[in-house]
Image (cartoon, helix red, strand yellow):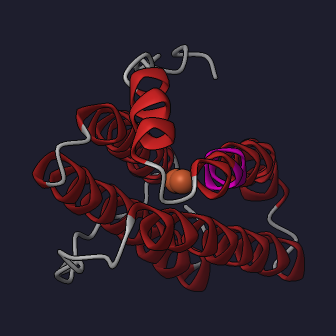
């Protein structure tokens, strides 16, 4: 069992990971509608990753004999002004998630919950990667600018992204 406050916070984070997946699916659908299927693919893979993040919280709660409590997932936006605006949103969203993870670590430390702190360290490292990959694509979208050929080339590149499920031990 873990502290009730910690349990509540972990359930909330599981909900935020599911919302992240929902947000990226919405962005994927937006890109498909913009005839940028490579961008759509990148978002689809991103959404799949977010679902694996949510499942890590689910599994950890089960493992600690705590309750998994599913809550409402709010409606994400469905439109963005441009591919650039969408990727600015991704980068901001990931920075916000990093802040949430840091808050969870603070709570685990406050409660001297070393096991949960240890569990959360995977997410601390993951958020470094999430910020790096989203800001990387954001920079490329900026470079492509409004040029149709630049966006087309980038779309080809983003079409290559594949989903790699994390190893069971990870
Ligand atoms: Fe995540
Ligand atoms: Fe993420």
Residue at the location (40% across, 22% down)?
A: 156
x 74%, y 42%: residue: 129
Q: Is residue 91 left or right of residue 158?
A: right
Magenta residues: mostly which secondary structure? helix
Residue 167 locus on image (x, y percent): 55, 14
Q: On the rendered image, what quadrant is the C terminus found in? A: top right
Reply yes or no: does residue 70 show up in magenta: no
| Residue toward you, 108 or 160 | 160
**Residue 11 percent across, percent down from the top left:** 42, 70
* Identity of the residue drawn at 52% across and 69% down: 10
- Picture quadrant of residue 158: top left
144 to 48, vertically: above or below? below
Magenta residues span 134-139
Q: Residue 79: horizontal and vertical position, in percent?
A: 21, 76
Q: Tell whether position 138 is magenta.
A: yes
Give the quarter the ligand 2 occupies. Answer: bottom right
């Amino acid at each position: 069992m873990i502290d009730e406050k910690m349990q509540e916070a972990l359930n909330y984070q599981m909900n935020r990971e599911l919302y992240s997946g929902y947000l990226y699916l919405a962005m994927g659908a937006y890109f498909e509608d913009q005839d940028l299927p490579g961008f759509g693919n990148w978002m689809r893979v991103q959404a799949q990753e977010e679902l694996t993040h949510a499942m890590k919280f689910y599994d950890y709660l089960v493992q600690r004999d705590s309750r998994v409590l599913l809550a409402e997932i709010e409606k994400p936006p469905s439109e963005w002004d441009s591919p650039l605006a969408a990727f600015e949103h991704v980068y901001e969203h990931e920075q916000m998630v990093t802040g949430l993870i840091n808050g969870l670590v603070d709570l685990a430390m406050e409660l001297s919950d070393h096991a949960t702190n240890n569990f959360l360290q995977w997410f601390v490292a993951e958020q470094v990667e999430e910020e790096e990959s989203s800001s990387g694509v954001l920079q490329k979208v900026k470079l492509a600018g409004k040029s149709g050929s630049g966006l087309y080339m980038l779309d080809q590149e983003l079409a290559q992204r594949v989903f790699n499920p994390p190893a069971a031990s990870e």
